[in-house]
Image: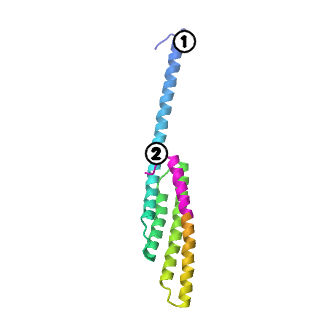
Amino acid sequence: MTRKPSQPLNLAQIGLFMTLLLVSGSITFCVSRYIALSKNADECDRLIAQLNEGHRQVLNFQAKDAKSTHNLAHNLEQMTVKLGAVQLGNPQLRLYRREFARVYHELGENYQQMGQAWSQASQAKPTHQGQQTLQKEIARVQSVGISVTQTAQEADRLTQQINHYCGLNHER
């Protein structure tokens, strides 16, 4: 639209200009919001995939002996490393990642202690001292079991928070 410098803009031209400006701004906002939400969804997916892997390891664990318990402890420690490798830009997701790394670390330590107790108990001789060792290790496993339960409850709470934050109403 060309106008002579001496011609004032009429109300229709100003209205059209303002409408185009608002539409352009709205489109820009919507596109940038869509990009941000897509990035957040991608980060949620990557974090949840890693968390599900750790969850599957714990659920599929079958305590057969001290070695299997030590293996789970080692796998959980590896999960803390894998979680740390998940690239996240979202500060809230980074916080969830850090909390879950702590949970997997605690569970790993707990299962390591259970494996040690199992090993000690299996080496106990059928003597009075061996019986005392066995009772001590049983008490140790029970104590660690309580800690595992509390840590698992913390993991459940964190899972609910992540699912809520990422807009999920179910597990992936």
- Across and down, in percent, residue 2 comes to 47, 13
Q: Of marks 1 and 2, which one's residue comes earlier in the chain?
A: 1
Q: Look at 43% across and 54% down and name the residue there.
A: 49
Residue type at mark 1: give it. Answer: Leu
- Across and down, in percent, residue 20 comes to 49, 21
Q: Nearer the viewer, residue 53 or 14?
A: 53
Residue type at mark 2: give it. Answer: Ala
Look at the image and name its color scheme.
rainbow
- Across and down, in percent, residue 54 comes to 45, 61
Residue marked by disc 2: 41
- Across and down, in percent, residue 157 comes to 55, 55
In the rendered image, the vertical position of residue 37 relative to residue 153, given as above or below: above
Residue marked by disc 1: 11
Q: Look at 57% across and 81% down and name the residue there.
A: 136
**Which region of the structure is painted magenta?**
150-172
Q: Residues within 10 Å of mark 2 (few under 14, many from 20)?
A: some
Residue 65 in which image quadrant? bottom left
Q: Residues within 10 Å of mark 1 (few under 14, many from 20)?
A: few
> Main SS of the magenta segment?
helix
In the rendered image, the vertical position of residue 95 relative to residue 152, given as above or below: above
Q: Nearer the viewer, residue 11 or 7?
A: 11
Checking the image for residue 104, the label placed there is none
